[in-house]
Image (cartoon, rainbow, N blue to C red):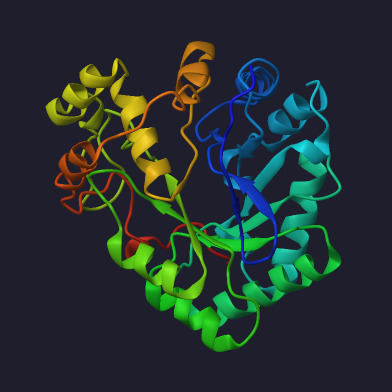
Amino acid sequence: MNHQVPRIVLNSGTVIPQLGLGVWQAANDETEHAVRFALDEAGYRHIDTAAAYGNEEGVGRGISTSSVAREDIFLTTKLWNADHGYERALKGFDTSLERLGVDYVDLYLIHWPMQDDDRILRTWDALEKIAESGRAKAIGVCNFEPRHLQLLIDHGGTVPAIDQVELHPHLAQRDIRNFGTDHGIVVESWSPLGGTSNSGWGKDSKPNTLLTEPIITRIGDRHGKSAAQVMIRWHLQSGLIVIPKSVHDSRIRENIDVFDFELSEQDLSEIEALDGGVRVGAHPDQMNVGGPE
């Protein structure tokens, strides 16, 4: 299956497919199957994992047992909070490469800013060193607010290529997106469908109701598409990178089947009106879990 997934050129010159497969909360065995199916059967060329997910080995096995060449796959992983700091970050990256069974990643991200600006800068210095070595084609961050991004910019080195943040119709992240546009930082959406229907895990978070939101299901009915497909299309047409997670073959295939329709201006306006600043995860300023001892 050959989907024409659009590609975006990052400020590093690296080219990233705009739609990929996320594997958060997936065990190694199901991750291996999902990655191999996504690559061989569904046409994906972009896989997003993290050290904290505990499934880098499964991602690596899925890639190595697929029929797709490594150089044709965009692979992202992330530095966990316990590995913040210069030396720790370098070691954490080496460990991720070993688990993945690869010589390089296409994108390496700091998973959370935590609450230590000096340590963020030391960690970013390590990512710059990794990028200089060629073992990460691009570097970036996750869950950074504009002030965190400005901290890195003021540091005077590499501007992050990507800021991956919680982003969906209930949390449109306008300030971060505007900051990214102004500074050449591409925004990537995690939990792009609003997370799960279980209770949220952040202090002020709420369960996801987007998959049954009447406005979105009505738009889906107009186009003969599911609510998930409507939201993925919204991300794409908004210029965002989107990485919906699934380990189910049918949903993996459905999530990339979004290039035969286009949302109208009316559709987009109706979806934009759903933004209420509601999270399913933690706010970065409240997230301080798992840092170095």
Where's residue 2, x and y in %?
64, 22
Residue at 35% from the left image edge and 49% from the top image edge? 167
| 55, above or below 90, in the image | above
| 157, above or below 225, in the image | below
Residue at 62% from the left image edge and 25% from the top image edge? 31
Marker count (numbered): 0
Quadrant containing the N terminus is top right
Residue at 57% from the left image edge and 77% from the top image edge? 119
Q: Is residue 196 left or right of residue 50?
A: left
Q: Is residue 77 left or right of residue 179?
A: right
Residue at 33% from the left image edge and 34% from the top image edge? 231
Residue 217 picture quarter: top left
| 268, above or below 179, in the image | above
Q: Nearer the viewer, residue 139 or 143?
A: 139
Q: Nearer the viewer, residue 172 or 86?
A: 172
Q: Nearer the viewer, residue 49 or 54?
A: 49
Where's residue 205, x and y in %?
23, 47
Residue 192 picture quarter: top left
Quadrant containing the C terminus is bottom right
Q: Is residue 288 left or right of residue 129?
A: left
Q: Nearer the viewer, residue 276 or 4?
A: 4
Where's residue 142, x and y in %?
50, 58
Where's residue 75, x and y in %?
69, 43
